[in-house]
Amino acid sequence: MSSVRTQGCCNQCTAVLTGPYCQNCGQPSLAVRRSFRDPIYGQTGRLLHTLGLVIAAGGYGGFTASSVLHEDPTGYAARIKAERLAERGITEAVYDERVESRFKTQYSILITLSSFSYAFAFWVVERRRGKSWLVHLAAGIQYLCFTFILTAVAFGLARLTGVRLTRHPAIGIGMVVVLAVYIMFTLQRVYGDRRLRAGAKMLFVLLVGVVSDTLLQYASLLIAGLTA
């Protein structure tokens, strides 16, 4: 068990320590031995919480309400924000915090619907093969999981390196290429399509996915904005 007696001064803010953590900034004392469990579940670890954010929000710092709002060409979400600020008399910072929290919750729920849009796309291009709808749904779910992994890695690396993906279109193009290759692989392995035919079908599936995910992002943003 960690000692609770004074451990000297905090290395972060120089406040006098009276326990295993600084009461001023929360920095742990280097003089206190920490268990392996602490960095996973503890106050300064939160590894599982971070992984949850990565999976649910398209990467840590990835699909955020502010990023979607910034790329909204219609300006409708910005008008909702201005109206809510005027109606409720709250500060912009408070409103943004509420919207961000609600957006991540809504998007985490709605994004699962993408699997059905992907399944529909696979059914459209492969309906003549007479495969069960469950086959198409399984292909859609696997593709959704792959997009989660890809975006989590991309946004996680971007955050670690300080790179803003919106300023580097080549990265986005590269991610689309990877998704296209995965779809072609699925069409060839699951449905037995040859390369040329799989390439043509891949374009349709990819287009459906882009449209579906974009609509779900804006739907999540509008729901968050209206309820914040």
Image (spheres, grey):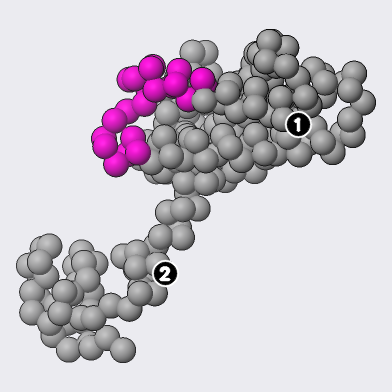
SS state under label 2: helix
* Residue positioned 33% across, 20% down in the render: 167
Residue type beneath disc 2: Tyr
Residue 94 % position (x, y):
39, 43
Which of the numbered marks, if any, corresponds to residue 214? none
Residue 46 % position (x, y):
39, 62
* Residue positioned 52% across, 25% down in the render: 178
Q: Along the horizontal axis of the image, is 177 left or right of 188? A: left
Q: Along the horizontal axis of the image, is 59 left or right of 39? A: right
Q: Tell me the magenta residue range.
A: 157-177
Q: Is residue 168 one of those drawn in magenta?
A: yes
Q: Residue furthest right?
A: 130
- Disc 2 versus disc 1: nearer the observer: 1
* Residue positioned 41% across, 69% down in the render: 41
178 vs 11: above or below: above
* Residue positioned 64% across, 43% down in the render: 109
Residue 218 visible in this rendered orientation of the protein: no
Quarter of the picture containing the N terminus is bottom left
Please tell me how many numbered marks the rendered image carries. 2
Residue topped by disc 2: 41
Does label 2 or label 1 sit earlier along the sequence? 2
Which of the numbered marks, if any, corresponds to residue 190? 1
